[in-house]
Amino acid sequence: MPEAIEISDDRIYTLVRPDASLQKLTKGAVHSEGPVYFHEDDSVVWSDAHGNRLLHWNSTNNVSVIRNPSNYQSK
């Protein structure tokens, strides 16, 4: 059963449709951040910062690692 999304500020609906849903693209990331959507090829790129990887998703190839190590520098 999917977890519920709690909306605490209705202004979010100016950015996200009320019937939108979340989709888990992959598992196993240590700390994901910075997703960027590219409309040209309907893909998403994000970092697994502490896992030191850069990941890519598209509807054709699903998830792939595009840079490992990503040379993330933790302070």
Image (cartoon, grey):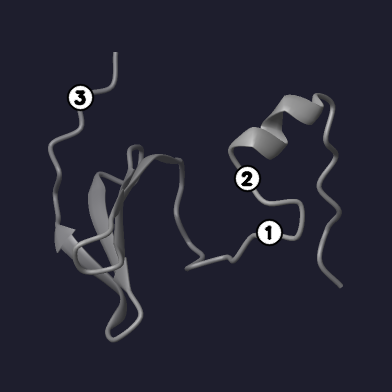
64 sits left or right of 14 in the view: left
| Labels 1 and 3 touching (C-beta < 8 A) | no
Of the pair 14 and 41, the residue shown nearer to us: 14
* Distance between the alpha carbons at the discs numbered 1 and 3: 34 Å
Q: What distance separates the C-alpha of mark 2 from that of mark 3?
A: 33 Å
Which quadrant of the rendered structure holds the C terminus?
top left
Q: Which residue is drawn at 19% across and 63% down?
A: 40
- Determine which of the numbered discs, if any, sits on residue 16 in the image: 2
**Mark found first going from the N terminus, 1 or 3:** 1
Badge 2 vs badge 1, beta-carbon distance below 8 Å = yes
Q: Is residue 10 left or right of residue 27?
A: right
Label 3: state its secondary structure: loop
Q: Residue 74 sits in which quadrant?
A: top left
- The quadrant where residue 9 appears: top right
Give the residue pinned by disc 1. Answer: 20
- The label nearer to you, 1 versus 3, is 1
Compare marks 2 and 3 and give the one earlier in the sequence: 2
Which residue type carries mark 3?
Gln
Q: Distance between the residues labelled 2 and 1?
A: 7 Å
Binning the other alpha carbons within 10 Å of mark 3 as few (below 14), some (14 to 19) or many (20 upward) gives few
The kind of residue tagged 2 is: Val
Residue that numbered label 3 is attached to: 73
Q: Which is more toward the observer, 67 or 19?
A: 19
Residue at 87% across / 73% down in the picture? 1
